[in-house]
Image (spheres, rainbow, N blue to C red):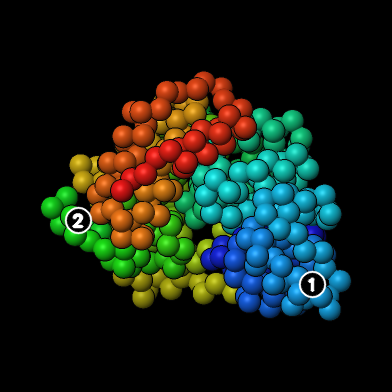
Amino acid sequence: MNITVLGSTGSIGTQTLDCAENLGLNVVAMSAGKNYDLFEMQIRKFKPKAVAMSDKQAAEKLKERIRDLPVSVFSGEEGILRLFEETQCDICVNGIVGVAGLRPTVAAAKKGVRIALANKENLVVAGDAIKKICKENGAEIIPVDSEHSAIFQCLNGICPTENDIGSIQSKIRRLILTASGGAFYGKTTADLHNVTASDALLHPTWKMGSKITVDCATLMNKGFEIIEAAKLFDVSSEKIDVVIHRESIIHSMIEFVDSSVLAQMSLPDMRIAIQYALTFPKRAESPVIPLDFTSLPPLTFAKPDYETFRAPLLCRQVLRTGGSCGAVLNASNEIAVEAFLQNRINFLHITDFVEKMLDKYPVVSEATIDELLETDKKIRLEERPD
């Protein structure tokens, strides 16, 4: 089986390559951002036919360093898209962070391949459009987010002869997404005025990139996941609940109409979700340590504090409104998180800025991919959260 790994030097990408090696898959193409040192090592190990780097200067340095290898090197967004023309893959794992992953997802969908999607921003910005393109071209999306993989696994575990998600909606009362609560769980608004980026990056259970870790701290990540779940599983926001589960052992649950609950459990290791997306509908041995129930800490659950962490409420509003709201939400959040990481704004201003942008920009109904990306570009050019 041939796979393409987008964002191979990031957290999802490196773990995907671990899974590919474990499963004996053939990596035909890879992309990265700026880290040409790690990327060179990956290229020499997995021997893809074509690679791309979003940073053009990094691509030039890489090209010089691997000129002894028979591999094509491309650069920029167009270079990443060219990977789909230069190689043939069965599965594309998209681990590119943010809206930068949108056009590659569309390109993979148009090729009719399986998309193992770790980029939740794609569905936040353009979920309906992506699903339409997938349907037209016979592509499928398998979620890699741990929460959505858990829901997907539960849904496909209901009955082996009834795996069409649309046919089982009548049996489901709600989807329950679990959340660690991030670095600031239990804090009040007064506690958060002077927290730093270093504080926000201290996630209790998962090791992830800085952007998504800050999103976990604001609970924006969980709000994005509400939107993602609604798009992936064709349910309304009213049928999606969130519960704080600090231990990150239960990754999400489904509740049936008879009040029975089915949960997916494992140690917090993304390789389970990644590997399931690669092997579905089959399962394979993995290097992940099995659960030892006799040594687990007590599993706790609590309601989210939406007064202090308002981001999920904004995301539910975006889901109800639709149109270009998702693009406004994502772009304003990305630039606000970047400003926070650069110590230009305080933590609380992230959500305040997103709310301000949602109020400022008019909604464009049934926006095309190009229109959504234009909205994204406009916000990045014109707005500053400082």
**Badge number at residue 133:** none
Residue 56 quadrant: bottom right
Q: Does 37 appear above or below 132?
A: below
Instruction: Name the residue rendered at 64%, 58% in the picture.
Output: 54
Type of amino acid at the residue the image marks with label 1: Lys
Which element is circle 1 on?
loop
Q: Residue furthest right?
A: 70
Residue 325 percent across, percent down from the top left? 45, 30
The answer to whether 93 appears left or right of 201 in the picture is right
| C-alpha gap between disc 1 and disc 2 | 47 Å
Residue at horizontal 50 percent and vertical 67 percent from the top:
269
Vertical placement of 125 versus 288: above or below? above
For this rendering, which residue is in front, 364 or 92? 364
Identified by mark 2, the residue type is: Leu
Point out residue 41 in the picture as x, y percentages from the top left corner: 68, 78
**Disc 2: CA contacts within 10 A as few (<14), some (14-19) or many (>=20):** some
Q: Which corner quadrant of the image does residue 141 belong to?
A: top right
Residue 82 placed where, x, y %? Answer: 77, 51
| Mark drawn on residue 192 | 2
Across and down, in percent, residue 306 comes to: 24, 42
Instruction: Specify few, some or many for label 1: CA neighbours under 10 Å numbering under 14, 14-19, or 20 or more.
Output: some
Name the residue beneath numbered marker 1: 47
Please identify the quadrant where the N terminus is shown.
bottom right
Q: 354 or 105, which is in the foreground?
A: 354
- Residue at 41% in and 48% down: 335
| Total marks in image | 2
Q: Is residue 224 left or right of residue 112?
A: left
Disc on the earlier residue, 1 or 2: 1
Determine if residue 238 is in view: no
| Label 2 residue SS | helix
